[in-house]
Amino acid sequence: MHKLIRLAPIALAVFALGGCGSPKPIRYYSVQIPAAPTPSTHTYAIDLTVGRVAGSDLLASGPIVYKSGTNQVGTYLYHRWTDSPLDMIQEKLVRMLRSSGDYESVIAATGTGGEITLRTRLYDFAEVDSEAISGLVTMEFELYSRKSGKVLWTHFYTQTEPVQGKEVPAVVQALDRNLDRGLNEAVVGLNRYFAAHPPATN
């Protein structure tokens, strides 16, 4: 009994130490979204729909992903995106297409899409750990015509961007730069397609 009494203060001290301190905060990050444009003219009389970006369940949630081996993928516990990469990329692509001034309207699809729909699939949006840290973005685009039931144009993008540093904010900046480059390629490619295949006017 006396032994139990002597051990009680020790147990309480250990319990108190274990409960000390606040939990580690989660840090949130986002990609840079262009300001909403107000173009007064347009090049093509097209109502373009940007479909929901497709991707894995992991990319549909918020953790920042890293690859540390050929088949090994992990996520940061205390670093997350403010929104899923799939949603952020759709929003950014809509803004960039609107800013181009090429289309009569550009809207984000919440369902199957409109008559002319730009579809995107995101394969990689992750930090890659090798001899040097980089940010990997891999995406595929296709322009689909509901009227003809055909894919009119496709574009595949994959690129790594060097990370300037070893902290997560530097990884986020590298991924955002890489994403900008890939989305710009898609915007320019779409413009070239419609320049070569202008829509019929009534």
Image: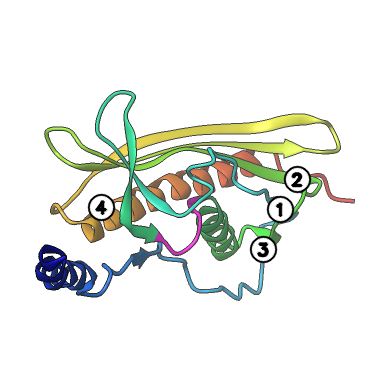
* Kind of residue at badge 4: Val
Q: How far apart are marks 4 and 3 (CA)?
A: 36 Å
Q: Which label belongs to residue 42?
A: 3
Callout 2 touching callout 1 (CB < 8 Å)? yes
Q: Badge 2 is on which residue?
A: 116
Give SS at disc 2: strand
Question: Neighbour class for label 4 at 10 Å: few (<14), some, many (≥20)?
Answer: many
Q: Closer to us: mark 2 or mark 4?
A: 4
* Kind of residue at badge 2: Ile
Q: Which residue is drawn at 56% across and 73% down?
A: 37
Which numbered disc flags the more N-terminal residue, 4 or 3?
A: 3
Which numbered disc flags the more N-terminal residue, 2 or 1?
A: 1
Question: Neighbour class for label 2 at 10 Å: few (<14), some, many (≥20)?
Answer: many
- The answer to whether 137 appears left or right of 139 in the picture is left
Q: Closer to us: mark 1 or mark 4?
A: 4
Q: Badge 1 is on which residue?
A: 48
Taking 107 as reference, is 157 above or below it?
Answer: above
Q: Badge 4 is on which residue?
A: 171
Q: Distance between the residues labelled 1 and 4?
A: 32 Å
